[in-house]
Amino acid sequence: MLYYLFEYLDKTMDVPGTGVFQYITFRSALAILLSLMISTIYGKKIINFLRNQQVGETVRELGLQGQNEKAGTPTMGGLIIIIATLIPVILLTKLNNIYIILLIVTTLWMGTIGFIDDYIKIFKKDKQGLKGIFKVIGQVGLGLIVGSVLYFHPGVTVREKATIVTNQTENIISQVPVEHKSTTTTIPFTKNNELDYAKFIEWTGEGYENWAWLIFIPIVIFIITAVSNGANLTDGIDGLAAGTSAISVLALGIFTFVSGNVILSGYLNIMYIPNSGEMTVFISAFVGALIGFLWYNSYPASVFMGDTGSLTIGGIIAVLAISVRKEMLLPVLCAIFFAENLSVIMQVSYFKYTKKRFGEGKRIFLMSPLHHHYQKKGYHESKIVTRFWIVAILLAIVSIVTLKLR
């Protein structure tokens, strides 16, 4: 809203200095500062409110060191992240930007699913929370919305390299950029690094491009479901999910900024995505909210994010990556999420297989998800979190390097 106010003051009233709000970099800096202030200053009040409402974590007995001390710690702290993100976004972004609308919908949608799950666990005394099938239905529903909007909305386009246009009568040669709808994405670490999902159904014959949504939308659903579940599983020890997510989102912020800038995208020879740069402001607010939340979530945690936060984080990361056409980079950028997911899948599958084959279930890890395996090995959780952060930083650097390393 402030964006439109300052735009009016600049263009209509010609007030000096108000034009600075047109710059994404300026609004991004304001967004991260404002979200940090909200999450750190008002975060304590939200935690006290949750404590007064007896919104405490019910800890399952897993035989982990220091586990019992966490009982009663306020959860649903994801509300801090959501509030501290949305307020700067509403104030500082172009609210008619389709990418911003999608991200706001994602935040509220996944936040609601996580809130319902936490509510059932705490107030209904059901440790299982929201049944898995309903979580999946919610994730699939969001995937349908995001995939459909990105495919069908006229404001979601990409710009190819400029085409040469010759005016023979005036003997003028000019370069004209072409913006068009596309299901093209980016393949990391390759020279000719663009892949069009529509090519998967090229065998169907002429006009196959019109049916590309049959491939694109299911891919979007799969990515949103996988990443949100990965973030959910990563949220197991103090500061792990928030810290690794902040690092990954910061890297995505670099991608959105360069992809939405016609000069930088041309210099780096990457896909230019009109209007996508506005997501940088959202990302700045989100990173500020995550860092502010870490003030209270670092060991020993004063609050847990709960599914309210973890599902929201995963959903936002997935939508950001898909929007900026970097979803194929997620296995690198969010490798920690996928490792946590994979450890659970491997553990459960191997246990069932060995129990059926030998009559006794065996395990690959001492405990899954992966961070609990290291806890069982005797590592202190703060050491595990710090090392996971270091790995996340390395993965983010590798991901950013793909802008030039092909």
Image (cartoon, rainbow, N blue to C red):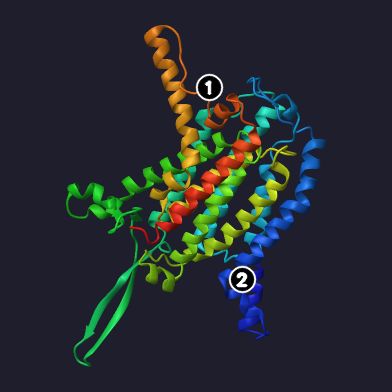
Task: Judge by depth and name the residue closer to the eye, 30 or 151.
Answer: 30
Q: Is residue 331 above or below residue 14?
A: above
Look at the image and tell me whether residue 110 can be seen. Answer: no
- Whether residue 311 sits left or right of residue 321 in the image: it is right
**Which residue is under mark 2?**
26
Secondary structure under badge 2? helix
Q: Quadrant of residue 130?
A: top right
**Which residue is under mark 1?**
366
User: In the image, what residue occupies the spot 34% across and 53% down?
Assistant: 189
Check disc 1 and give the amino acid type: Leu
Look at the image and tell me whether residue 19 can be seen. Answer: yes
Which comes sooner in the sequence, label 1 or label 2?
Answer: 2
Percent position of residue 292, x then y: 69, 51
User: In the image, what residue occupies the spot 69% across and 23% down?
Assistant: 125
Image depth: mark 1 or mark 2 in front: 1
- Whether residue 80 sits left or right of residue 247 in the image: it is right
Percent position of residue 204, x then y: 19, 47
